[in-house]
């Protein structure tokens, strides 16, 4: 099937949800990619606390992801849970304008991530239910492309504001950050409106489920749980990208340069996400995911030994290739393992497992970074060496427990 043929046969939900994610990321990325600089340079927050904020923001929302996914299965409906999640995040972001302490930033981030927790599993299940097995990778890739295109636009707006308000100044200023927060309100609101007006529920072929989360858990294919366990190991080394932003600052990049670095990353991520998803439909998702994790390990080793800001910039661009290869592919792989009426809870468990791992991952990275001068071998390079090692461990486990079985003829469910 040609790419054009795939495009013409996509359900309109996939297009509409891609636009929703695009608008949401225009709003989110112009704020949250600059948040590490706001915390570190303006509020004087320690890197260990930044790791705590990023980890707690993701982990606390993970409980909500499980419940929201299971609830959407029980209802047989996905849309209005997604609306509630996107709406809560849209309401939370403007309060960042008034943030004056790291505690207030944590509270706002927590609320925003709870909104993400409510919407993520129902939205992913809605995407999977709106695509055929043969176009699933392409559909998730298209959605990721919309998501990252929004990030590119949001970062471009942030870069323009920084250039206009503080050209020639290296550090981010509070007034500049506040102006960016105000500009983020419109796209967040538009995203919720598009979701309400243009997305429709896709009915499960077996109707609403009345089983408990525990019963759901027992019914899901065991290969799904093997995959999730390996994802947890990988994620323990995949700390918040805030630490890459801080590394770029340590290596000499200004706030404006860092937004340029982020623009490079998101452009590559957006351009490659859809073709990467389509390739996973053709050659198989396991081999695509394995290749992406190997690339991640190499990028993290490169970051560990980087000496200049421009090296960090180049490696972060390659990092965009890793994300394009793996993000949509991993979510499509979940749908391969799990039938439609169980996908809400499956996506909840999958996203929650990653979220629960984010807290120890970010705390570990913050502690390793903060240990500079106290213990030999610690400092800015340590989190990235640790991440590369855990990624290689995940690659080995994935190869022997998933990839070889599929290659030997154990076929995925579609």
Image (tube, grey):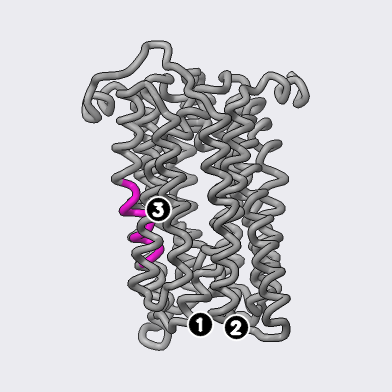
Q: Position of residue 380 (x, y in %)?
A: 49, 76
* Majority secondary structure in the magenta region: helix
**How far apart in space, not on screen, are marks 3 and 1 (Cα)?**
23 Å
**Tags 1 and 2 in contact by the CB under 8 Å rule?**
yes
**Tags 3 and 1 in contact by the CB under 8 Å rule?**
no
Kindly identify which numbered label has been placed on residue 311.
none
Q: Earlier in the sequence, mark 1 or mark 2?
A: 1
Q: Which residues are magenta?
A: 53-62
Q: With 274 as the anchor, is 121 left or right in this view?
A: left
**How far apart in space, not on screen, are marks 3 and 2 (Cα)?**
27 Å
Residue to which mark 1 is pinned: 41
Residue to which mark 2 is pinned: 171
**How far apart in space, not on screen, are marks 1 and 2 (Cα)?**
7 Å
The residue at the far bottom in this view is 373
Q: Position of residue 120 (x, y in %)?
A: 44, 40
Q: Position of residue 378 (x, y in %)?
A: 42, 78
Kindly identify which numbered label has been placed on residue 113.
3
Task: Please tell me which residue is depicted at 53% across the width and 75% down the height of the picture.
Answer: 37
């Amino acid at each position: 099937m040609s790419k054009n043929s795939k495009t013409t046969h996509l359900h309109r939900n996939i297009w509409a949800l891609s636009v929703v994610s695009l608008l949401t990321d225009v709003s989110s990325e112009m704020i949250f990619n600059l948040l590490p600089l706001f915390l570190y340079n303006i509020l004087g927050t320690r890197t260990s606390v930044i790791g705590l904020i990023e980890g707690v923001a993701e982990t606390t929302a993970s409980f909500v992801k499980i419940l929201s996914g299971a609830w959407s299965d029980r209802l047989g409906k996905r849309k209005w849970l997604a609306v509630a999640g996107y709406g809560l995040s849209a309401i939370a972001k403007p309060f960042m304008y008034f943030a004056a302490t790291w505690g207030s930033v944590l509270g706002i981030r927590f609320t925003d991530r709870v909104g993400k927790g409510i919407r993520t599993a129902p939205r992913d299940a809605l995407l999977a239910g709106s695509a055929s097995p043969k176009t699933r990778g392409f559909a998730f890739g298209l959605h990721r492309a919309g998501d990252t295109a929004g990030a590119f636009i949001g970062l471009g707006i942030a870069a323009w504001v920084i250039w206009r308000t503080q050209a020639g100044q290296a550090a981010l200023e509070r007034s500049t950050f506040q102006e960016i927060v105000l500009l983020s309100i419109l796209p967040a609101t538009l995203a919720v409106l598009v979701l309400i007006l243009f997305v429709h529920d896709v009915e499960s072929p077996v109707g609403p489920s009345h089983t408990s989360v525990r019963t759901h858990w027992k019914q899901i294919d065991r290969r799904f749980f093997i995959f999730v366990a390996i994802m947890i190991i990988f994620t323990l080394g995949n700390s918040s990208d805030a630490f890459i932003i801080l590394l770029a600052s340590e290596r000499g990049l200004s706030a404006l340069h860092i937004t340029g670095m982020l623009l490079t990353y998101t452009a590559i991520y957006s351009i490659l996400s859809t073709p990467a998803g389509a390739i996973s439909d053709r050659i198989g998702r396991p081999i695509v995911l394995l290749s992406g994790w190997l690339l991640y390990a190499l990028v993290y080793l490169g970051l560990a030994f980087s000496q200049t800001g421009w090296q960090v910039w180049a490696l972060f661009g390659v990092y965009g290739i890793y994300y394009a290869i793996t993000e949509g592919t991993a979510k499509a792989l979940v749908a391969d393992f799990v039938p439609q009426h169980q996908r809400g809870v499956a996506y909840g468990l999958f996203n929650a497992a990653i979220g629960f791992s984010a807290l120890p991952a970010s705390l570990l990275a913050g502690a390793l970074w903060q240990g500079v001068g106290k213990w030999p071998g610690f400092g800015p390079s340590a989190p990235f060496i640790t991440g590369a090692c855990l990624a290689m461990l995940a690659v080995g486990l994935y190869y022997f427990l998933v990839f070889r079985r599929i290659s030997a003829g154990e076929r995925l469910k579609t």
